[in-house]
Image: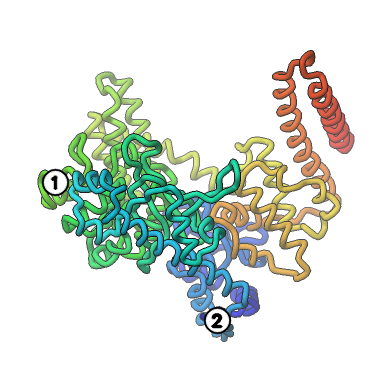
Amino acid sequence: MAKINQQDIDTLRERADIIEVISGYTSLKRGGTNTMKGLCPFHSEKTPSFTVDRARGLFYCFGCQEGGDLYKFVEKIENLPFPEAVEWVARKFAFELRYEEMRPGEQAARGLKARLLAANAEAATFWHKALMDSPDAVDARRYLKSRGFGREVAERWQLGYAPGRNSLCRHLLGKGFSEKEIEQADLGRRSERDRSLYDSFRQRITFPTWNLQGAVVGFGARAMGDAQPKYLNTSETPVFSKSRVMYGLNRAKSSIARGADALVVEGYTDVIALQEAGIEEAVATNGVALGESHFEQLKKFGHRTILMLDADAAGQGATERSFGSHHRLGIEVLVATLPPGRDPAEVVAADGSEGIRKVIDQAQPLLEFKIEQLLDKVQLDTPEARSRAVREVAQVLGWHPDPIARHEYAFMAAQRIGVDPEAVQRALAEGRVAPEASGDASGRDQDRRLPERVKVEREALQLLLTRAREIERWTGMVSESDFTSPARRELFRAAHAMHSSDRQQPLASMADDLSPDALSLFSELAVGADGSDEEDLARRCEEIFVRIRVFSLEREIKKRRNTLGGINPVTDPARHDDLFTELVKLEAERRDLLRKIRGAA
Ligand SMILES: [Zn+2]
């Protein structure tokens, strides 16, 4: 397996002009001192909040929070995986890429994945055999039969039964898999008590989950009887990510690619029942809420998705953020409502596949569904109630990025509420003015609404990212644990790693390995960051890094005070005194630091 030479990736990133690439998708004008601005190509807007920092090779949208380097831009806009995005840029700038064989470490990572897939395949076979033949599985077979799943269905879906008693771990060890591999595939887990290995699933019906290439990557497991929780799922492993893999998509993809709308249902048995009835486009998540990464998967095959979830779960799909991401991905989301108290399998059993088709045909756009859900809950019998409803609806409508669609929904909602369409339009206009106006001038206006602690952490990260060499004498004051969100901690870690490495790397190369949240924060902080002069920089650093420390100390002090409150000084004097001494020390440190900032100011 050949991969692109890393040095070429870095060289190309520096040589290619990010402005030239992005100008092919939106027109950019001069923004701040170091930035260009334009209308965002990822969401619809009237005033530009999409910002490009040519010198740093980064972009960030203050409206939808998309950000990254040139490669991330091409990945997103052209919907390409990373290596193909690099090749795309190379073609555009006539740059010849070198390819090389993988290094041993990378081969080992591939080797590990292959071993884990083999262990999963072996587990699926072992459990399937148990379901088909073992006397242990009588109840499991009876249950499946009651759901209409006979032997043939069980074979087609490789359903299984996990008897427990560590039979799977023993079997896998006998087949030459190591304890570590079994644990890494989450087929076995370690006992808290004596660290011994036990089967992850016991006395449960197992549903293997496949990746798009058809390899078993994980399992869902349903309890027999009343055991809780009813469903367990494989946790994240090197071959299984719950936020990406969708149950049944390996089978559904060709039918979706041929033009059927993807149909998202609640669980494993719904997928099986529907696909068996000829509704081949049915898929489900693996025990997690439907998220943006799932839509990215579905988007590979089609552009419309129908949610056939219970009303609450479908309603949760309609949030401000989800509309942004649907729009960005170019996916249309509809909601199909099942007859009350029925699941898809029951509809199939009663009315066949035509019954389901009828439900699908009546699917409504997600926003329409959300508005109806909202209006169902309120009385519309007084002018005040109608006015309140108008405002609530306008707020939800404001999420829709498309002004024409917004207009249509406003008309529909007005009829439903019994007011003049003008009223909804006006509320919509009022509601939308605030965020757009403040977002235009400078996205950093949002800063003012953030809690003090968050502001300070963000500013520290910004300095670490853009001025690291000049501020070395302060950075030692803070550590990862001083940051209070996962994205900020990740970014601190990455900035720290980059600055402690010998090789001097361009800032934009950090974009390669960050999680989506950290990437967005990184771009936001780095794009257009200004350079204050040295004296000012020293003052800022002093203040910021000291204050982060103070915040952390305050957190520690509070924690110890709480513990201290629960300790009886008479019965447990030693512990009480220890804690008290620590508390005094922390308080003293805090006082000293505060004196330092006030003295400086
Ligand atoms: Zn945007």
Q: CA distance from mark 2 to mark 1?
A: 58 Å
Residue found at x 83% / y 49%: 474
Give the left or right position of residue 188, taking residue 333 as reference. right
Q: Which residue is mark 1?
A: 349
Secondary structure beneath disc 1?
A: helix
Spot occupied by residue 417 in the image (x, y as percentages of width and height)? 25, 30
Q: Label 1 amino acid?
A: Ala
Q: Amino acid at mark 2?
A: Phe
Residue wearing tag 2? 93
The residue under the point 55% across, 73% down is 20
Badge 1: residue crowd in 10 Å (few <14, some 14–19, many ≥20): some
Q: Nearer the viewer, residue 204 or 129?
A: 129
By what rule are the colours in the image chosen? rainbow
Can residue 45 be seen at all in this image of the molecule? Answer: no
- Could you tell me residue 384's position as x and y percent? 33, 20
The label nearer to you, 2 versus 1, is 1
Percent coordinates x, y for residue 396 in the rendering? 37, 38
